[in-house]
Every structure is written in C-alpha cells, then in structure tokens.
Amino acid sequence: MQYMIREKGYPKSLIKLEGGMKLNSMQKRTDIIAFNSAGHKVLLVECKAPSVKISQKVFDQIARYNIVHQIPLLAVTNGLEHYYCQIDFIAKGYSFLESLPPYGSL
C-alpha cells in the first residue's frame, strides 16, 4: 500500500483495506481496493505473504473476486513478486502490464 501511495500517487483516502464481499453465498475478503475521485473501483489487489508463491491458484482467486467487483485493473503481490493485469470487459480479454499505472493515468 505504501508503494501505491508514495510511488504511484494513489490517495490514501481512496484506498479500502480488507473489505468483505459475498461470492456464491460465501463470505470472502478482498485485501485492497482503490477508488477514483468519482467513487468507482479502479484497482483490486490480492496480497500474499512473502513465503507464498504466486501461482495460478492466486490468479484464479483474484479473478473470482473480480466477478463480483468488475474492476479494470488487478494486482497480485507477495511483497517480492508483483503482477499487474488490465481487464478489457468489452473484448473479454486481459493483458499483463510491466508496472502499476500511476493514479493520475486511470
């Protein structure tokens, strides 16, 4: 979260930590959601411990959460490895990004 705020300009006041959600009638928890100034969700982050390898299972988890949220930018991190993905809901596709886009570019 500090990287998002200090390096990428995400306003602390527009970041929600550990939010609850329902997925297939089960209670789940998102790690980080960032909003734009209009209140729309712009980034969903799944955080794992450094000892947890970023695997397909982690990507599947954030993809399931995004079925509920419909957020265009996803990030997965364990503090050592970081992956960023832009979702195209119209074309029903995605592309990986080299880095997290700055807040001002969203």
Image (cartoon, rainbow, N blue to C red):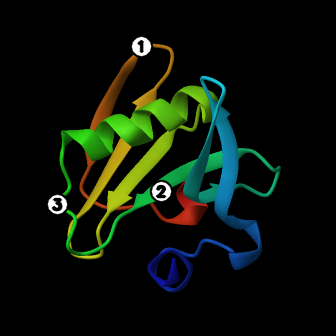
**Label 3 – label 1 distance at C-alpha:** 30 Å
The one nearer the camera, 32 or 49, is 49
Mark 3 or 2: the one toward you: 3
- Amino acid carrying label 2: it is Val
Please report contact status of discs 3 and 2: CB closer than 8 Å, yes or no. Answer: no
Residue 24, located in which quarter of the rendered image? Answer: top right
Q: Is residue 77 above or below residue 88?
A: below
Image x and y of residue 90, in percent = 50, 14
Q: Residues within 10 Å of mark 2 (few under 14, many from 20)?
A: many
Q: Is residue 88 above or below residue 10?
A: above
Mark 3 or 1: the one toward you: 3
Which circle marks residue 91 in the picture? 1
**Which is more N-terminal, label 1 or label 3?**
3
Which residue is at a point 20% across and 73% down the rendered structure image? 51
- The residue that label 2 is drawn on is 45
Which residue is at a point 49% across and 74% down the rendered structure image? 8
Q: Is residue 88 left or right of residue 94?
A: right
The one nearer the camera, 104 or 70, is 70
Of all residues shown, which one is farthest toward the front? 26
* Secondary structure found at label 1: loop
Which circle marks residue 68 in the picture? none
**Which is more N-terminal, label 2 or label 3?**
2
Image x and y of residue 62, in percent = 42, 42
- The residue that label 3 is drawn on is 53
**Label 2 – label 1 distance at C-alpha:** 22 Å
* Secondary structure found at label 2: strand
The one nearer the camera, 84 or 45, is 45
